[in-house]
Image: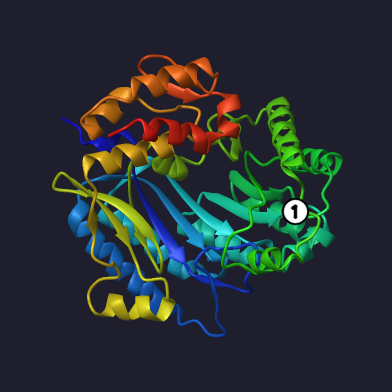
Amino acid sequence: MPEDWQTGGFGLYVHWPFCAAKCPYCDFNSHVAQRIDHAAWSRAYLAELERVAADTSGRVLNTIYFGGGTPSLMTPDTVAEVIAAARRLWIPANDLEITLEANPGSVEAGRFAGYRDAGVNRISMGIQALNDTDLRRLGRLHTLAEARAAFDVARQAFDRVSFDLIYARQDQTLAQWRAELREALAMAADHLSLYQLTIEDGTAFGDRYRRGTLRGLPDDDLGADMYEATQEICDAHGLPRYEVSNHARPGSESRHNLIYWRYGDYAGIGPGAHGRLSVNGVKYATESRRNPQAWLADVAAGTGERPRVALNGRVQAEEYLMMGLRVNDGIEPNRFQALAGQALDETARQRLVELGMIEDLGTRIRVTNQGVKVLNAVISEFLSGEG
């Protein structure tokens, strides 16, 4: 009988923790370093792959994702070594998706050719805005001209290119966002990640917001209008939403992220990387220390992971619900019940249908377009009726 994780698949996430500069909105584990010993990092990644593979040998590997930080600051040789090791340690899927995140300021044509030759077949580019004023406000080191040039280089080297934009930015109007989104769609990416600006604690923007110096943020109504415009324009251009913030041409969805949302297994290696691994019938949450030098020392001592945390069926069911309701596919109530040991709360299920928040197809539950806007409330409604 297949294990639960096989429904979602198996992927590898590799975290590169270094950036050229820290963006003021970013709460990811990224660090600015003057000197990087690339050989030491390559050795550490390879040691971690061997360690994780000992617990997961014989699996089909569906995806590899180089995230960060700014993975386009990695040497192509390091990327090639990681990919070659992963292909050796697991069984590579015939359609193995290998994504690398890139920032326009760190793109060189020769380097991209090196990544392609290493086996990367998909690029995710952090463009974030299509005007120089907002790029500066967001702390980006690249200009719009550099972003367009980098995108053109990526399109020449790779069949699959995605890029990110942030909307609901300071002083941004609805008309400006509509025009910018149409401009982005004209660039012929097959996938767009479109995020509403959120102010996170522990970031430079978070500090400014608390001091009252981050001005011009849109109110909730304008933010909602921008979200509606995003759906309308992307639908019209053939890139419908398949997850809360992600749009793709059919067939061009991020297979790696779908492993998360479909609650598969993924090995996370690198500083601060998280994972979910099923070993001997037990699903574990894995996590690594965030500090890059401390992580290297941990790997040298035998493991880059902190002690694994076993997840009981109830926790797994809740994680499956929270991740699965983000995507258009939705969740399977039977899978939830198998994990949790009890069915979804029937009262909550009926109430959410009556409110128009979910579509209940019996074997599958999906969040409606209305429900997506209040997804956290939908999830809370289900979970508050459990246990």
- Amino acid residing under circle 1: Ala
Against 331, residue 137 (above or below) is: below
Residue at image coords 62%, 65%:
110
Against 80, residue 94 (above or below) is: above
Q: Is residue 110 left or right of residue 53?
A: right
Q: Is residue 258 left or right of residue 225?
A: left
Q: Is residue 160 left or right of residue 383?
A: right
Task: Classify mark 1: residues with Cα within 10 Å, few (<14), some (14-19) or many (20+).
Answer: many
Residue 214 locus on image (x, y percent): 75, 63
Identify the image quadrant of the C terminus. Answer: top left
State the residue in front, 304 or 210. Answer: 210
Residue 373 locus on image (x, y percent): 60, 33
Q: Quadrant of residue 227?
A: top right
Residue 173 locus on image (x, y percent): 84, 44
Q: Quadrant of residue 144?
A: bottom right
Asked if residue 263 shows in the view, the reply is no
The residue that mark 1 highlights is 129
Give the number of callouts.
Answer: 1
Against 235, residue 153 (above or below) is: below
Asked if residue 271 shows in the view, the reply is yes
Q: Quadrant of residue 81?
A: bottom left
Residue 274 locus on image (x, y percent): 37, 58
State the residue in front, 298 or 368. Answer: 368
Residue at image coords 24%, 48%:
311
> In terms of secondary structure, where does tag 1 sit?
loop
Residue at image coords 46%, 69%:
77
